[in-house]
């Protein structure tokens, strides 16, 4: 018997017991769907990280300053450090803003024109902060698309005003949402000088530093550290490179991913045990058939191959349906989590490979049991 015949026989057995086959493959279906969604969301997260820092990723340094005396003069000094290409200050300020009848946390980020390039911010409408906004401490703001949709219901917000803590800000731009970097629900950018005046804060506590293209990143980090220690006589700051930030983000999502993979593994294990049980029942129900096949010349190898292919086919059917459901689920959930839609070839490959391996592993024992049946005893079986 050739492979196509084995496969056709396997599909005939499955179609003859559709409901039992559905119940058997349910665990495989759920496990595969969950696995595809987890793998796809991991890929989407990594894609967003690359897109977020794709322009300057390996050249980016974030400096957190704990000193309350870090201002414009210090920014100018850092710009003069060898290897530094660009410095953009930022100040974070958390406040509450009313959207409809609900109070929402909003993160105001005091920024400079360089922020758009260093952090790879994409403008959908209008413009970002310009030098004159910073110099004149203008009360202008740039909001994210989601907040714009909440406030203006699809209408253009450019030129409209927002009232934050009794101060009016004119909206001059709308940015794309940056999901994984959002600590709060909504983000709003204003000139950092305006925020310093608005909040009463007299110092800068964060800086994004862009290193020159041909410069060694670690060497530049060490020069910044030496400058800081020389000026303040202590190491009252922290520096993170792009790779360190990526590692922190991944560590934060690893637990969620691990839980998803454990659930997928348990579902596949239960599905595999179900397949093994059904195949053992099938061996008992088809004992006479096995005896007839052996009597007309089928070898133990033929019987093993037939039952293994049935087991793999049964598992693969659940895997294919689970893959389709998993892809649909990933396409639905990715936008809800502010992640780009990303279905990789690896996810689809996993959706086919894992169920096949489960079917193979849990089909070995029933296949061996079938091949060891004595043909004479099998023919007498009622």
Image (cartoon, helix red, strand yellow):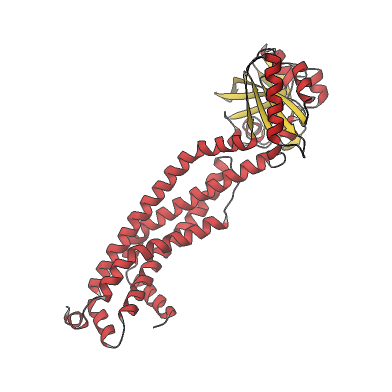
Seen at 70% across and 35% down, the residue is 217
Total of numbered circles in the picture?
0
- Where, quadrant-wise, is the N terminus in this rendering? bottom left
* Residue 85: image location, x then y, percent: 78, 32
Name the side, left or right, on which 128 lies relative to 235: right
Q: Is residue 120 visible?
A: no
Seen at 59% across and 32% down, the residue is 182
- Where, quadrant-wise, is the C terminus in this rendering? bottom left
* Residue 267: image location, x then y, percent: 37, 52
Seen at 73% across and 34% down, the residue is 118
* Residue 178: image location, x then y, percent: 63, 36
- The answer to whether 84 is drawn above or below residue 335 in the figure is above
Seen at 41% across and 57% down, the residue is 29
Residue at the extreme right of the image, as rendered: 132
- The answer to whether 21 is drawn above or below residue 55 in the figure is below
Of residues 34 and 202, the one nearer the viewer is: 202
Residue 205 location, quadrant: top right
Name the side, left or right, on which 137 lies relative to 37: right
- The answer to whether 292 is drawn above or below residue 199 in the figure is below
* Residue 94: image location, x then y, percent: 60, 20
Of residues 120 and 108, the one nearer the viewer is: 120
Q: Is residue 272 visible?
A: yes
Residue 371 location, quadrant: bottom left
Of residues 138 and 112, the one nearer the viewer is: 112
Residue at the extreme bottom of the image, as rendered: 296
């Amino acid at each position: 018997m050739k492979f196509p015949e084995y496969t056709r026989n396997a599909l005939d057995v499955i179609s003859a017991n559709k409901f039992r086959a559905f119940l058997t493959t349910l665990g495989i279906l759920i496990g595969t769907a969950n696995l595809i969604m987890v793998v796809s969301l991991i890929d989407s997260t990594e894609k967003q990280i690359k897109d977020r820092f794709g322009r300057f990723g390996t050249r980016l340094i974030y400096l957190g300053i704990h000193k309350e005396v870090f201002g414009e003069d210090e920014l100018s000094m850092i710009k003069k450090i060898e290897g530094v290409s660009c410095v953009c200050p930022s100040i974070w300020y958390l406040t509450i803003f009313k959207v409809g009848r609900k109070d929402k946390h909003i993160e105001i980020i005091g920024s400079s024109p360089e922020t758009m390039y260093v952090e790879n911010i994409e403008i959908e409408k209008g413009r970002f902060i310009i030098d004159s906004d910073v110099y004149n401490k203008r009360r202008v703001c740039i909001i994210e698309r989601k907040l714009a949709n909440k406030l203006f219901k699809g209408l253009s917000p450019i030129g409209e005003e927002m009232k934050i803590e009794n101060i009016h800000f004119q909206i001059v731009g709308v940015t794309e949402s940056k999901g994984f970097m959002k600590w709060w629900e909504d983000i709003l950018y204003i000139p950092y000088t305006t925020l310093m005046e608005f909040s009463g804060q007299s110092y800068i506590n964060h800086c994004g530093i862009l290193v020159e293209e041909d410069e060694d990143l670690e060497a530049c980090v060490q020069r910044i550290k030496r400058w800081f220690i020389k000026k303040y006589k202590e190491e009252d700051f922290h520096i993170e490179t792009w790779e360190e930030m990526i590692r922190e983000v991944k560590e934060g999502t690893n637990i969620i991913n691990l839980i998803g993979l454990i659930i997928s593994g348990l579902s596949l294990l239960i599905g595999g045990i179900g397949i093994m049980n059904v195949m053992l029942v099938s061996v008992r129900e088809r004992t006479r058939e096995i005896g007839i096949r052996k009597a007309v010349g089928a070898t133990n190898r033929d019987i093993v191959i037939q039952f293994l292919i049935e087991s793999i086919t049964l598992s693969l059917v659940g895997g294919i349906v689970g893959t389709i459901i998993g892809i649909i689920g990933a396409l639905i959930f990715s936008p809800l989590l502010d992640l780009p839609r990303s279905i990789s070839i690896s996810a689809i490959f996993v959706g086919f490979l894992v169920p096949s391996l489960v079917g193979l592993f849990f089909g070995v024992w029933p296949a061996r049991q079938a091949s060891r049946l004595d043909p004479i005893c099998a023919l007498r079986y009622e």
